Amino acid sequence: MKTLSFLLQKEFKQIFRNPTLLRMILAMPIIQLAILPLAADFEIKNINVVIVDHDRSTYSIDLVNKIIASGYFILVDYINSERQGFDYLESDEADVVLEIPLDFERNLIRENHEQLFLAINAINGTKANVGGGYLSRVIGDFNQEIRMEWYQRGRRSNGPTIEAKAINWFNPLLNYQFFMVPGILVVLVTMVGAYMCALNIVKEKEVGTIEQINVTPIKKHHFILGKLIPFWIIGIFVFTLGLFLVARLIYGIVAVGSLSLLYGYLALYLVAVLGIGLLVSTYSQTQQQAMSLAFFLMMIFLLMSGLFTSIESMPGWARVIAQFNPVTYFIDVMRMIVMKGSGFQHVTKHFVIMTGFALVFNTWAIINYRKTT
């Protein structure tokens, strides 16, 4: 224990003597957590729409007003020329063009049926898909209102109307920041743990101090613990700052579930992540190599974690890879405990899996670390 104590003192002195490293560890994650969730908003607004209205009837104008009042669309132009509408689409000034045909109202009243034409600019696939979906929903609501109006006037429509209303549990207002902040905090803690740990060890290789340590009586496990424990403590400190300073004070996110359960999982997760950092350092001889390898892993961890896209919607091979991604499980646990208030019985499987990750990564790293004596 005395040897380990001296090693820990050395590591903390090295960290606190390097102001750049301190800023990278403490300030950067907090700034990123404060800014990134504001940009990572899945709700798409300000969709530019051009409406080509050949009818100019009461119904067509009511439909246009309903579209604009939805708040999702910006009316670029209200015209009666189909060619001009497509010009807007080709010049990227419009995301969606809605064409209302001539005699729209008359055909709707006489024949109970009419068709609208939607042209969607699919260069931005997400915006096009969501914009088309929003517009179709607004048109569907307008259709229901007409059917209800006719029904109240005594005119029978072709069939019954069924209206379904959804309630969002655990996030009633569907606030995307509540959804994104816990996930981004997990990613930042992962970067602090794996990235910084790997760079710190490789730096010792570059300056040659690791060779000096290797010729001392310091045992392998003392050296590894001396490298891991400081970043384990720093990881918990950064997580605490993010959870209470940024998530609570800036975004008003308060964990519904047990904080002790959340910190228990964090402690285990950091052991696994630090094992990854140690493993990266064993395969790298320079900091550039370590950064490249860590960046490669972080990109996979980030994009295949379920943070931005649902894992269930990924292809089969991607879902298999996601099962071997530790970030996936911690994001899952964060959302379950913070938003749903889940208890230990709900995250037992996650604890078991993360224990497996911690054992595998650290055992692999220790075996790969060749200390010459």
Image (tube, rainbow, N blue to C red):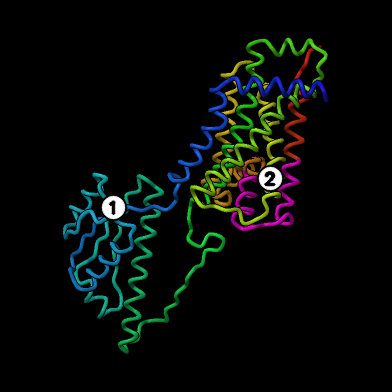
Q: Position of residue 142 (x, y in %)?
A: 33, 71
Q: Is residue 313 left or right of residue 355?
A: left
Which residue is rendered at x = 39% and y = 52% of the image?
Answer: 44
Residue where numbered disc 1 is placed: 48
SS state under label 2: helix
Q: Is residue 125 left or right of residue 90?
A: right
Q: Is residue 168 left or right of residue 206?
A: left
Residue where numbered disc 2 is placed: 263
Which residue is rendered at x = 68% and y = 37% of the image?
Answer: 270
Q: Quadrant of the C terminus?
A: top right
**Pointer 1 local density, CA inside 10 Å: few below 14, some 14–19, many at least 20:** many
Badge 1 or badge 2: first in the primary sequence: 1
Answer yes or no: is residue 132 visible.
yes
Q: Position of residue 223 (x, y in %)?
A: 76, 21
- Determine whether 334 is above or below 142 in the image: above
Q: Is residue 270 magenta?
A: no
- Determine whether 303 is above or below 70 in the image: above
Magenta part of the protein: which range? 328-355
